[in-house]
């Protein structure tokens, strides 16, 4: 697709609501005059409002997304990651394809539609232990995780572990938080009949909101109705209290309360997209400041829209958020259309128009065929609102194929048992794990799973040999390590490791750690010496099983 | 679910066709007398015949599987991994749940239905570079990979890379191989219209079969028809030639031919399940030898069936494979029912019956609404066979919900565009990569992605500085490493690394490697010294960016 000499090249970066609707409108309004290309990291558009439905297995993963190439058939679509922008040369650097070589794409007009990122750094442990709800993979992960908790809770004999597994915490009670907690609650309710060892009373759902009520953008009476519905379906709604920190087994609230949980969904912490942050543009509240035409002042041919942009709705905007376009899909779609018109006007030598739009209202599903709606000033709640919610999203979903698929799935699922298939994916091979003082890292009898290095805090290892009565104890601090039994012939932990204070460990999964420690001479020598010195003749089980250690490599040709 | 004192405990390990149908029949025939439990690593049954359809996006991943708890509502289902069996104590050791502590499950009667594993060790590089088609995750991975190849081929500027990306090789032409190549060919055909930079002639499909014809279990005339159909749809069928070795960019055949490819699907190499191999039972052709009643001789209360078992169909079986039940779903289902009857008979003091069954025939889909069928001795090919194929599998799929879902999806997809959504999952963080002499590992300008340790072979690094004219060269052998630039402030490779002979590297992804190298003092010191000594002042870009190196950790609280 060579760029025609007399056509202006418009590059849209980001394939969310803003980017896609801008690109569609550019194609329509600028046909023959513009050469439009959209760049996105994934080859599909995510219909974010339906992600909670994916998490609850109400619809298939693939049905909440639409392939960008099908949605934008007449445009060029490029699956690539944006690395940087040179505003002087007017090029965007992307990395793409099999060889991962950066490529510069020139533009005449650039539309930045990168959306936002998630920033949970203010809450210790939350970045490492919370699930987010931004992308399709997040929704899929949450669903798999929830079913996995039910599977594990059905067989555990440890009451504390069962409590953690059956405690589901959602942080943040905007749309996304409310719909996510409601939908997962519904999934679990329907699934419980297949788990004979879990009593419904053992399952607990929590919705934590720092503000003094849920759904802050809704009228108070609808928020009240929503709270009642959620509580009626067994969700504990906690408002006016924030989240303080998290570990793999609990979340701590600002009032000191600790909730045992292995499932934390964070729908808070909207922050700037990492690239937006690095561009050197004028940001306010983490968003790119534009003029009323959505142009970025001082940068030739640069436009921004959607959640990434701060678009004023009035001529002299101040610090009042109401002076700016809100970060909703509804606004992004309107911005996209208007921005396309402005680009076409500008190229044609005409005047662009300032962005103006008034929200048509909001809808939020509460699960169990109930919803709240505030449309054109009319407030609705209950089943009628829920039907409206479904109808609205179905009509809003781009592409006939997606509409039909989602519609049929909804129909089928109204008469079908819940889909409790747990499609497991491999856990990440290295991760940081937060611990609170007194937490167990592992204990005797557990299957060995990996190697630990201390990042922060101190930990005590205790080994008791019930046969000989021997007792071994050792403390570990930052830079020290334990769990190297993964390197020797042994399947189970013999020691107990407890956190002596709040801290962080770096965990590396057995497979990756042993591969590296065997192939890399520096590590091989170090661990050989370390294991002999530390455990020596004291515990024969620690003796390196040298034939075993090479076994994986020996199977290599 | 406490075990009632006067009920016999029957444990079924494995949730494939054999295990599931045995469990279902045990529940039905032994109600009140038996306490049946099924143990499986996944919480779902995989309908393997439909995996190629999943790979081709013809049906949703979740529709080719059925939750075991829904399929076996009156039984206990346990999601756990089997670690070992103590035939003397009559217990099965499983690892399950959140705490990963092994648990012993007692049994009176044990049904081993573990299926087979994949063993590709005879083909250097194939275990590391081939995709398999055993499980749902495999099918999903193949689909994602194929779409990913199209995305990358659409943007690459390197003719060799494009050739690799558009070469799709399937090894083994039994059912699974034939259906997989046919279905993926269909997916690619339909998808190509969305990839403007790929010409249909650039795409190549290969089906490699060591035997002298495809579909060895079918009558010759049907295999001939199938070959014609496949060739007509653009698949190169290569018979009588085996696969020798593979790398990430090519497969080498036994006749010396090299096919450029980044997609190798291996449907060959059926080997014993790793647990079956470790049990100390009498194996033949990697399968558990049973008597005609499916009992394992010499082991009290132990039965085996399905692909894991070698069940004689005659009283004095010899070395002729026809003397034993073939490894097909059809036989496994019959074996399951018969085995259940035998267990019930044995417990009731009655005589078990020898297993006897004659195949009703076979069906194989060829894509593009064509199939071959050999049913009750009647040979069919073309569209009629394909309709029969669909009808047969639909009726065979257990559970009404699954039938309805698959049926509706098939109907919808007949009028829908292909689903080219590429849901990417994170690549594994460490992996072995095979290279042929002359292969490039990386070259200047590529984005750095990870660290390499030499397992086998030798490699040459060359760095040329175009500004100063400086030239740097170094060779690396086993135990040595390169690519440690991931630790310093730098985004792109500056050197070229080429394999000087055939060899293997261990690759560790940037994220995991840098975390470990920063947290683990032994590595941190080693690399600090190594980078200074090796690159020193010669190349300033190599100087450790010490503030940068800590950045990830510094974001930790």
Image: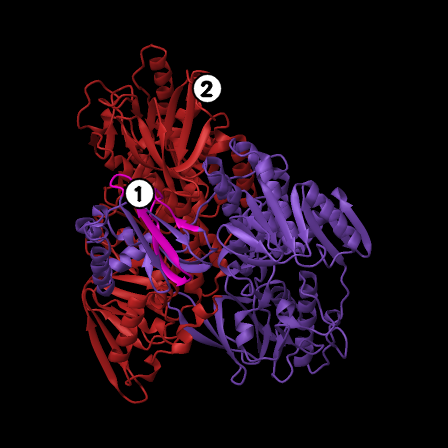
Chain colours: A purple, B red
Mark 1 neighbour class, 10 Å CA radius: few under 14, some 14 to 19, many 20 or more: many
Give how far across and how far down residue B510 sits, in percent: 37, 66
Foreground pick, A252 / B180: A252
Q: Position of residue B177 (x, y in %)?
A: 34, 44
In the image, taking residue B3 as reference, residue A49 lies left or right, namely right
Nearest to the eye among marks 2 and 1: give it: 2
Could you confirm whether marks 2 and 1 are on the same chain? yes
Output the chain of dot 1.
B
Q: Is B43 situated above or below B510?
A: above
Q: Report x, y in % for residue B352.
A: 32, 14
Where are the magenta residues, as a range? A440-469
Q: Is residue A136 left or right of residue A331?
A: left
Q: Which residue is mark 1?
A: B173
Q: Which residue is rendered at x = 66% and y = 58% of the image?
A: A210
Between B59 and A161, the one lying in front of the other is A161
- Circle on res. B28: 2
Q: Earlier in the sequence, mark 2 or mark 1?
A: 2
Residue at x-position 61% and y-position 79%: A302
- Residue A446 in magenta stretch: yes
- Evaluate whether residue B483 shows in this view: yes
């Amino acid at each position: 697709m060579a760029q025609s000499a007399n056509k202006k090249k418009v590059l849209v970066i980001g394939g969310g609501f803003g980017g896609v609707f801008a690109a569609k409108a550019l194609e329509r309004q600028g046909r023959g005059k513009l050469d439009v290309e959209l760049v996105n990291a994934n080859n599909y558009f995510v219909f974010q409002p339906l992600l909670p439905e994916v998490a609850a297995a109400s619809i298939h993963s693939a049905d909440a997304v639409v392939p960008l190439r099908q949605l934008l058939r007449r445009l060029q679509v490029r699956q690539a990651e944006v690395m940087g922008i040179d505003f002087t040369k007017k090029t965007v650097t992307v990395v793409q394809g099999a060889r991962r070589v950066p490529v510069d794409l020139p533009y005449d007009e650039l539309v930045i539609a990168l959306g936002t990122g998630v920033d949970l750094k203010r809450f210790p442990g939350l970045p490492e232990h919370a699930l987010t709800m931004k992308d399709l993979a997040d929704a899929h992960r949450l669903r798999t995780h929830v079913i996995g908790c039910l599977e594990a809770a059905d067989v555990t004999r440890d009451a504390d572990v069962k409590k953690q597994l059956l405690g589901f915490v959602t942080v943040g009670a905007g749309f996304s938080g409310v719909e996510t907690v409601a939908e997962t609650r519904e999934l679990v309710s329907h699934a419980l009949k297949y788990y004979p060892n879990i009593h419904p009373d053992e399952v607990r759902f929590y919705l934590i909101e720092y503000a003094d009520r849920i759904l802050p953008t809704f009228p108070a009476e609808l928020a009240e109705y929503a709270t009642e519905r959620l509580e009626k379906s067994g969700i504990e709604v906690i408002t006016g209290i924030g989240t303080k920190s998290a570990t793999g087994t609990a979340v701590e609230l600002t009032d000191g309360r600790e909730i045992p949980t292995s499932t934390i969904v964070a729908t808070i912490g909207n922050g700037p997209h990492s690239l937006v942050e690095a561009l050197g543009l004028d940001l306010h509240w983490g968003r790119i400041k534009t003029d009323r035409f959505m142009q970025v002042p001082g940068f030739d041919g640069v436009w921004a829209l959607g959640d990434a942009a701060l678009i004023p709705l009035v001529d002299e905007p101040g610090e009042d958020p109401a002076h700016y376009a809100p970060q909703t899909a509804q606004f992004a779609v309107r911005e996209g259309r208007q921005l396309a018109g402005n680009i076409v006007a500008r190229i044609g030598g005409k005047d662009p128009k300032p962005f103006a739009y008034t929200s048509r209202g909001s809808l939020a599903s509460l699960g169990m065929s109930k919803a709240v709606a505030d449309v054109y000033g009319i407030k609705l709640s209950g089943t009628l609102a829920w039907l409206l919610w479904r109808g609205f999203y179905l009509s809003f979903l781009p592409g006939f194929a997606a509409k039909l698929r989602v519609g049929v799935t909804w129909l089928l699922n109204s008469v079908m048992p819940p889909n409790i298939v747990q499609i497991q994916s491999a856990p990440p091979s290295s991760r940081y794990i937060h611990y609170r003082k007194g937490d167990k890292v592992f204990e005797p009898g557990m299957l060995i799973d990996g190697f630990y290095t201390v990042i922060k805090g101190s930990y005590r290892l205790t080994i008791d040999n019930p046969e000989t009565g021997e007792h071994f104890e050792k403390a570990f601090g930052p830079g020290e390590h334990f769990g190297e039994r993964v390197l020797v012939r042994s399947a189970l932990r013999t020691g107990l490791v407890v956190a002596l204070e709040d801290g962080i460990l770096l965990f590396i999964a057995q497979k990756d750690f042993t591969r590296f420690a065997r192939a890399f001479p520096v590590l091989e020598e170090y661990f050989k010496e370390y294991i002999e010195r530390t455990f020596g003749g004291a515990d024969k089980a620690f003796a390196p099983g040298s034939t075993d250690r090479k076994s994986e490599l020996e199977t290599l040709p």
